[in-house]
Image (cartoon, rainbow, N blue to C red):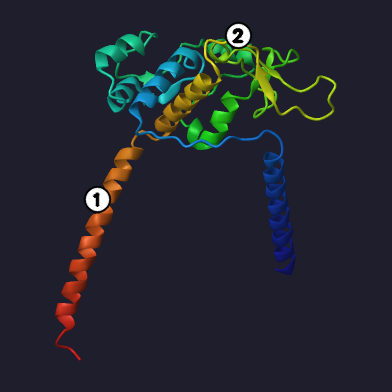
Amino acid sequence: MAMKMRIYTIASIAFLLSCASVSASSAVGWHMQAIETNIADKPSLQRGARLYIAYCLGCHSLKYQRYERTAVDLEIPLDIALESMIFTGQKIGELIETAMPEDSKNWFGGPPPDLTMVARVRGNEWLYNYLKAFYVDESRPFGVNNKVFPNVGMPHALLELQGIPREACEAHSEMKCMELKVDEGTGTYDADEYDKAVYDIVNFLDYVGEPSRLERERIGIYVLLFLIILGVFTYLLNREFWKDIH
């Protein structure tokens, strides 16, 4: 029994030390910018859906989300959604699948992951900074790398919008470069517009991760109000029952 307790204690300490080291390593390096999403902002979600379909859906599906559900939640007329969101020959009621061929694993070294739950798994802050942390790296297969996700195995999908990002540090610097600069005139968006576009995409993915969140929160308020009212009546009834008992 004592041996088991010692083993359990050692394992627990090792686990805590490993967590501490991971936390410390994530705190050192790239400065993560905070982000506060708002899935009640329908214009932002509409822009995010448009950008995702234009630049991300070619590789990354949302196979647990339906076109029709998305259009209804984002207040997009179904005829417009059918015309502007679906380019794979699917029907409005089908799941959002990518047109990527099945042999894409041979191109990227692995199939591009579905991103339906990526905001819940990775977190909005991680996604936001990841999309802003690509930079030119000729040693990588697609010519780019990422400060948040080193040795990333995908191209910079938003390169057309952002422009060509490069490390802003001196090439001979021994310190790890933590500053990026976009070549002037190489992107269709300026820095503020690109930040807004990235925010809209992350906001959309946050919505996709739990489309019913607003409805759940709305119902939750009514449930709490009901319980409060029920509690008041229960208290009054209990007091009435026991008023003559001493």
- Tell me which numbered mark, 1 or 2, is placed earlier along the sequence: 2
Residue 25, x across and y down, in percent: 71, 41
- Give the residue type that dot 2 points to: Thr
Q: Secondary structure at mark 1?
A: helix
Q: Pointer 2: residues within 10 angstroms few (<14), some, or many (20+)?
A: some
The residue at the point 57 percent across, 11 percent down is 187
Q: Is residue 135 left or right of residue 132?
A: right
The residue at the point 33 percent across, 24 percent down is 70
**Quadrant of res 143:** top right
- Give the residue type that dot 1 points to: Tyr
Q: Is residue 150 left or right of residue 162?
A: right
Q: Secondary structure at mark 2?
A: loop
Instruction: Name the residue beneath numbered marker 1.
Output: 222
Give the quadrant of the C terminus: bottom left
Residue 39, x across and y down, in percent: 38, 33
Residue 105, x across and y down, in percent: 60, 15
Residue 15, x across and y down, in percent: 69, 52
Instruction: Name the residue beneath numbered marker 2.
Output: 186
